Structure formats: structure tokens, C-alpha cells
Amino acid sequence: MKTYRIGVIGLGQRIAHVLAAMQEMGWTLEVAGHVDPAPVGAPILARAGIAPGRAFETPAELIAAGPYDLLMVGTPNHLHFEHINLALDTGWPVFAEKPIVRTAAETLALAGRLAKGGTPPLFIGLVMRSMPIVREVIARVDRGDLGEIISVDATEHLPPEHGAYLARNWRRRAEWGGSYFLDKVVHDFDILGRIAQGRVARVASFGGRRVFTADRAEFAPRTWSDGEAAYGAMDGGWMGANDAFQSDMDVTDHQTAILEYDNQVRLTFHANSHTSLPERRWYVAGTEGTMIADLARNKLMIRPALSRKKPERIDYGGVTADAHNGADQAMAVDLLAALEGEAAFPVTPFDSMEAGLTVMAIDEALATGEVLDCRPMWARYDAARSASPIRS
Ligand SMILES: NC(=O)c1ccc[n+]([C@@H]2O[C@H](COP(=O)([O-])OP(=O)(O)OC[C@H]3O[C@@H](n4cnc5c(N)ncnc54)[C@H](O)[C@@H]3O)[C@@H](O)[C@H]2O)c1
């Protein structure tokens, strides 16, 4: 097998984990160079026995030392648009982390560029698409096992240390991360849109910051029941803040949303970043059956609507401490198959932009406090894709 020569822009925790998973799944790879002022992922890469390659000051210098078989973009979200565009200019295949970009304006600009064609393959790390449980969810929906999808209830509830990390890491600021939902649950809205098989038409959202606030800093308990200090287990990383309660966080720490798709599928979503009973679950109700995908435990349960038998249960096992449950390894296999021309990657840049826009609509509804009509947003997106942008 050929050795993949890889260039990295943003060698953080994520790209280091993805590279480690690629190696674990049989890739022969060499990180030839990287650009990162302080690579947060360096220890993870070292543990995997992968050398980080030459350190370059700028993406232009990294690119000048090419060619590469793959350029990987793992910078904070506000830099994706710039770095993806630079990478696309080279003509070499690109892997970029989700969310593909951070704003609606960036989405329209990138959609216009990609729609024109002539760009190299762009793979987005919407890693849940590669999970066997998620592939089965999609297959069951497509096969009609649930009949017509009527309504969906979905959740993502994080443990306190994860919430504290979000409150200290760059994700705490909209200018860097976008929003809590954009960074954390764009995965879910990608799959939920695929399940609904429609585009969100109307949305409302309520949420805020009521956990990681300065006025709770004094009296919030700071120790776990076994005496260990709480809220500092994970390093804050790039632009990190010291204290989860006294950072300059401006995104939500809990949020709810209610959505109606253009085919009348109705969906509710509930997320909280400080829970003692973590959960990531999609409850999908159709005319012919009901399905619960428990992503935290990697278990699927499904039963036809009029069945009096026990539900069918599939346990995918492989639950891991990082909560990714083997998704990174599955994506590494998909990425290699796509680069070798053996199979299409399970998610396209357009899927990724549509998931991003859905979440941006939720956040706009949160900001206005109104029910948002999403049709003008999709009209702008479709116009960008047909390379004749309209203004409003
Ligand atoms: N697919 C997933 O499941 C998943 C999981 C985690 C993170 N992510 C995504 O991966 C990306 C990185 O997240 P992370 O958790 O690795 O964050 P991180 O903070 O660990 O890494 C970000 C890295 O970017 C570097 N950086 C900052 N500015 C830079 C610049 N101008 N040029 C080059 N490098 C720069 C930082 O020094 C840091 O090393 C984000 O887009 C995030 O949303 C995806």
C-alpha cells in the first residue's frame, strides 16, 4: 500500500485522534508537515507513535513544501473557511473537521465555489455517519421499516467535566466556535435531517447559560463525591480560560429547539452540558414502527407499530471512554476507501453545509425569540449553489 503523505493545518486533539485511528486501521501514513502555533494534539500523536513532521509558520509554507496526498484541516471553527479554501486551491484531497464553516455567509460562499466544480475531493469529519449503528438507522428508515416518519425526539446530555471543558475551551466564544449547537450537535442535525428526509421549514429555540455563570462561581460545589477536584479534568487548550464559571463564555450551556421540516416531520431537541445521566438518543416515531437509537450506549431498539412481540434489540458494543464508540476508526476506513476510489465517503460537503445551516437557523431563532421561517435561508443557499446568489 502506498504511504500517504499528509499535511496538517491545526494539529489539535481532534486531528491527532483521527490520525491515530487512521494508523490503527491500517493506513500507511507520514505526517510530512503541520502548521500550528502550539499543537494541542502533539501528546496524542506521540502516544500513537506518529511523528508530527516539519513545523511550518503558515499554510502557504506548508503548501509550498507539497505535494501531499491529503491535507487535513483541524483548526478552531472560525478558521475553517480560510483554511479549506487555501487547501482547495492546491487541488489535493482535503479532510476538514466539522462544522464545515462557522457562518451562513461562509456557507453561501463555499457552496458557490463547490457548485462551480473543479475542486478536489472534500471530506468532512461528520464522523457519526460512519458508525455502524447510524448506518443501520438510515438503512431502516430508507427501507421503510418505520413507514412515514411522523415525529422525532432527540437529546444530547454531557457530563459536567465535558461541559466545563466547553466553558473553558475556545468553543465558549461564538467568534471562535459559532455556538454550542453548531460545535456539538451539528452531527445530530446532519443525521436527523437525513432521517426526516426534508429541510427544516420552521424553528424555535430557547436556551441560555445558567450553569457556568460567574454568580454560581462562589457557591457551586467544586469537588466530586470521592474528593477529586471538579471542572478541570481536561486542559482548556487554545485560548483556554482558567475557570469554567468565570470565563468570558458567550454561548449557551443548555438549549432546546423545536423544528418542523418541510414534509411535516416534527422534532424536538434537548441538550444540556452539565448532567449526571449522560445521554445521546434519537427517538424516531413513524406510521409503521418506532426506533430508539441510544448513541451513548451504542444500542438500537426497534418494533413495528402493531407488534406485541419484544422489540428487536441490537447491541453494537465497543463503547469507549471518549464517547466516540469506534466512530473514528470506522471513519478512517471510509476515508481510505474514498481516497482509493473504492467507495463514496458517507457524507458530502453539501450535506455538511445543510446540517450547519439548520443549526444556524436554530441559533437565529434563539437570538430573536421568534419562530423562524427558514425558507428565505434555503432560497439563498439554493441560489448560491446555482451560482446566481440573490440578496435579501
Ligand atoms: N468530528 C468530531 O467528532 C470532532 C470532535 C472534536 C473536535 N472536532 C472539530 O475539530 C476541530 C478542532 O477541534 P479540537 O478539539 O481538536 O480543538 P483543539 O483546541 O484541540 O485544536 C485546535 C488546534 O488549532 C490550533 N490553531 C489555532 N489557530 C491556528 C492557526 N491560525 N493555524 C493553525 N493552527 C491553529 C491550536 O493551536 C490547536 O492546536 C474543530 O473544528 C472541532 O469542531 C470534531
Image (cartoon, rainbow, N blue to C red):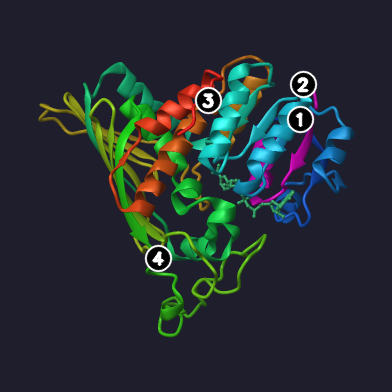
State if disc 4 and disc 3 touch (CB < 8 Å): no
In this rendering, the answer to whether 380 lies above or below 252 is: above
Q: Residues within 10 Å of mark 3 (few under 14, many from 20)?
A: some
Farthest-out residue, bottom: 218
Q: CA distance from mark 3 to mark 2?
A: 44 Å
Q: Which of label 3 and label 1 is nearer to you?
A: 3
Read off the residue under disc 2. Answer: 1
Name the N-terminal-most of marks 3 and 1. Answer: 1
Read off the residue under disc 1. Answer: 28
Q: Position of residue 130 (x, y in %)?
A: 50, 31
Q: CA distance from mark 4 to mark 2?
A: 50 Å
Q: Residue at x 52, y 18 (%)?
A: 386
Name the N-terminal-most of marks 1 and 2. Answer: 2
Where residue 9 is drawn, which disc sits there? none
Q: Position of residue 99 (x, y in %)?
A: 54, 41
Q: Which of label 1 and label 4 is nearer to you?
A: 4
* Element type at mark 1: loop
- Name the residue type under label 1: Thr
Read off the residue under disc 3. Answer: 389
Q: Is 13 inside the magenta-drawn segment?
A: yes
